[in-house]
Image (cartoon, helix red, strand yellow):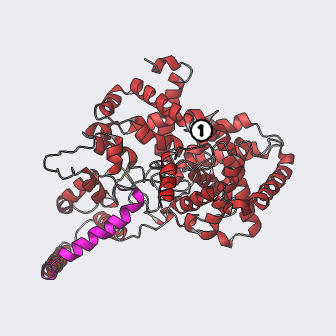
Amino acid sequence: MSTDANKKQFWKRNAAKVPGSIQHVYGAQHPPFDPLLHANLIKAGNKPPPATPGKPKKATTFQEFESITSDAWDVGDDDDELLAMAAQNLNIEVVMETANKVIENHSKQQERQRQDDETELEQREEDPQEDVAEDEEEDEEEEEDSRVGEGDVTSPEVSFASQSSPYTDGRLVKSQSEAPIGSPKDAAGEHASLHRQRSLPHRPPTIPLVARIADQNTSGTPIMTEREASRLDKFKQLLAGPNTDLEELRKLSWSGIPRQVRPITWKLLSGYLPANAERRESVLQRKRQEYFGFIQQYYDSRNDEHHQDTYRQIHIDIPRTNPLIPLFQQASVQEIFERILFIWAIRHPASGYVQGINDLVTPFFVVYVFEYIEEEVENFDVSSLQEEALRNIEADSFWCMSKLLDGIQDNYTFAQPGIQRKVKALEELVSRIDESVHRHMQQYEVEYLQFAFRWMNNLLMRELPLRCTIRLWDTYQAEPEGFSHFHLYVCAAFLVRWRKEILEERDFQGQMILLQNLPTMHWGNEEVSVLLAEAYRLKFAFADAPNHYKR
């Protein structure tokens, strides 16, 4: 027994990471956070912990904050416990009395509405000389009312295309019930609800719970504009030539790539395909065969003693990859991801597999699935694709992810020095471009490494919806050293974007909760384009003059 105890102590004492070992990353698995869905969690998180008599305790360090904070994957369990506790404390008589009051109030409101309608009808009959134009206008207003009523019960899974446009009178309406409807007496009754809606984040009312991956602006109107059609024609003309001008393709791609040509464009910009059109098919066949040769050679070794830890960690992380999107919960998709990540890990022993790399497969996989389907991909059953198409998607995703990681591999080697350098550069940059935010975080002892590590490790994929990540990567592919260098300026612009919310938080815990759960669930192409424009401005000012942000 003493020998076993000594062994355990020995391994605990010598548990330092070695090159190629599994490296756990704090916060790498947090999904994008929707404050509208987790409002109770935020309120609970902002409450100070109960003070212990004689030992007042305040979370002033990151380690203490981490020790008192639940992991994101335990949120569901906590909610279940809270619901169970609430159910035990409820009095059935109080519940029934409250329910009866609600039903009674609703019935009275319905009766008053019916009486108002009858009164209005009588007034119309007494006034036969009413203007025809006014009748038509009222009919239109009633139709608008009915559309609003229907919108209130619309399922969150309804497609963007089936919703009415949120634009009214040349302005963006934040909620369908905010559109100009009804008479002045109706407006007075709705004043309170409109005031509450205006205080909500600026977003369209038709964003589904699982935000769509397809190209959208936040207006939710996927119809192609004349400008977008013109851009698509330019891409097609450029790609149709015998030798694609990659420099011109990068210029076109910086502002976003149309969905129809994104697969071929990403393959060209990543260096996976040659510019010469005649060589592309032979290169694709050779690289795809090479990848499945790796599968035959290495994949059976996943249960070997020196590889089983790597495979086990991959197997654990795969279900956590975009857990809100059904596509990634399909068994066949998870098997594809396991093969891609395992083969990459054993072919790159300097880094091995690191938590966060699993996220980097998803944009490539989704984009290359679009090469074979026309419909939305969130609930698409990949087993309906032909086996050859699935094999092509898997191999193309592997090679393009490998090309990406080749440029940022020092992010994932022992001690992750690339991330350490970038986080330090981010701190220096923010201290120059927005000193008030920088000093505010310093005042409450918030270290950049505590939140920006994940931004660098996951390339902001845990902070943005997947559709925004795909749009962001259009520009990263077009930028020289987009993933390794330009990403720093995107992170700086992203942080300063939330300066108002950061300055409003007056304690360490509140700032950390905000920075790890930024409300971007309803972002679209418009917000990403503004973010990229600001990042480019920062790069233009600081990239070629690093002394500008060094004190």
Q: Amino acid at mark 1?
A: Phe
Residue that appears at 56% across and 47% down? 471
Residue that carries the numbered disc 1 in the rendered image: 483
x, y (%) of residue 505? Answer: 27, 41
Q: For residue 461: magenta?
A: no
213 relative to 228, above or below: below
Q: Using the rendered view, name the quadrant where residue 242 is placed.
A: top right
Q: For residue 76: magenta?
A: yes
Residue that appears at 30% across and 61% down? 177
211 relative to 151, above or below: above
Q: Is residue 254 left or right of residue 439?
A: right
Frontmost residue, 511 versus 250: 511
Q: Is residue 461 left or right of residue 40?
A: right
Label 1 neighbour load within 10 Å: few <14, some 14-19, many 20+:
some
Q: Which residues are magenta?
A: 70-94
Whether residue 16 appears in this view of the structure is yes
Frontmost residue, 154 versus 538: 538
Q: Is residue 370 left or right of residue 143?
A: right
Which quarter of the figure is the C terminus placed in?
A: top left
Residue that appears at 42% across and 41% down? 451
106 relative to 264, above or below: below
x, y (%) of residue 368? Answer: 67, 56
Give the number of marks. 1
Q: Is residue 464 left or right of residue 311?
A: left
x, y (%) of residue 37? Answer: 35, 60
x, y (%) of residue 43? Answer: 25, 54
Q: Main secondary structure of the magenta part?
A: helix
